[in-house]
Image (cartoon, helix red, strand yellow):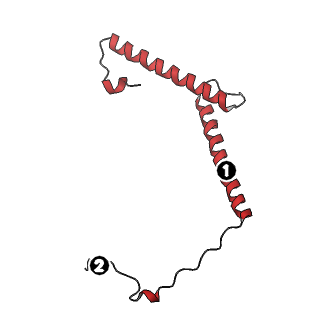
Amino acid sequence: MSSSPRHRYQNPMDYVPPPEKPRLTEAEKKSNHIASEQKRRAAIREGFDRLAELTPGMEGQGRSEGLVLQKVVEYAKDLVDERRKLIEEVEGRGGRVERELKKF
């Protein structure tokens, strides 16, 4: 096997470039941009909806993104506090908790 790259054409003059794709019109560009933005916003909405589903106390509330974030932070802090208390309880009873598991 030769170390030189293999070329499709023996003579570079035989190369014919592929035909150019037609360029998008300004209206098509705008339409694509709007569709992309709508898709991005839908993904964000779905993410907030999922956070709201996973967070206690969010059932039946209007979904304000600020409220969802506030409740998620409160819930995460509660989970961290609960974890810290469980670690303290285990160690208070003479158990051992590995250093890696103590990281918050």
Q: Which residue is mark 1?
A: 37
Q: Are marks 1 and 2 in contact (CB under 8 Å)?
A: no
Q: Position of residue 7 (x, y in %)?
A: 37, 82
Q: Which residue is mark 2?
A: 4
Mark 1 or mark 2: name the one nearer the start of the chain.
2
How packed is label 2: few (under 14 Cα within 10 Å), some, or many (20 or more)?
A: few
Residue at the extreme right:
27
Front in this rendered view, residue 104 or 28: 28
- Rendered residue at 33%/14% (across/down): 91
Q: Position of residue 63 (x, y in %)?
A: 70, 32
Does residue 69 lie above or below 41 as drawn?
Answer: above
Q: Amino acid at mark 1?
A: Glu
- Rendered residue at 52%/25% (across/down): 76
Does residue 10 lie above or below 1 as drawn?
Answer: below
Does residue 31 lie above or below 67 as drawn?
Answer: below
**Mark 1 residue element:** helix
Q: Amino acid at mark 2?
A: Ser
Q: Quadrant of the N terminus?
A: bottom left
Disc ID at residue 73: none
Front in this rendered view, residue 27 or 67: 27
Q: Position of residue 83 (x, y in %)?
A: 44, 20
- Rendered residue at 47%/18% (across/down): 82
- Rendered residue at 65%/70% (across/down): 23
Which of the 4 image quadrants contains residue 19? bottom right
Which of the 4 image quadrants contains residue 53? top right
Q: Quadrant of the C terminus?
A: top left
Apparent side of residue 43 relative to residue 11 in the rendered image (left or right): right
How many numbered discs, if any? 2
Residue at the extreme front:
13
Q: Position of residue 55 (x, y in %)?
A: 59, 28
**Mark 2 residue element:** loop
How packed is label 1: few (under 14 Cα within 10 Å), some, or many (20 or more)?
A: few
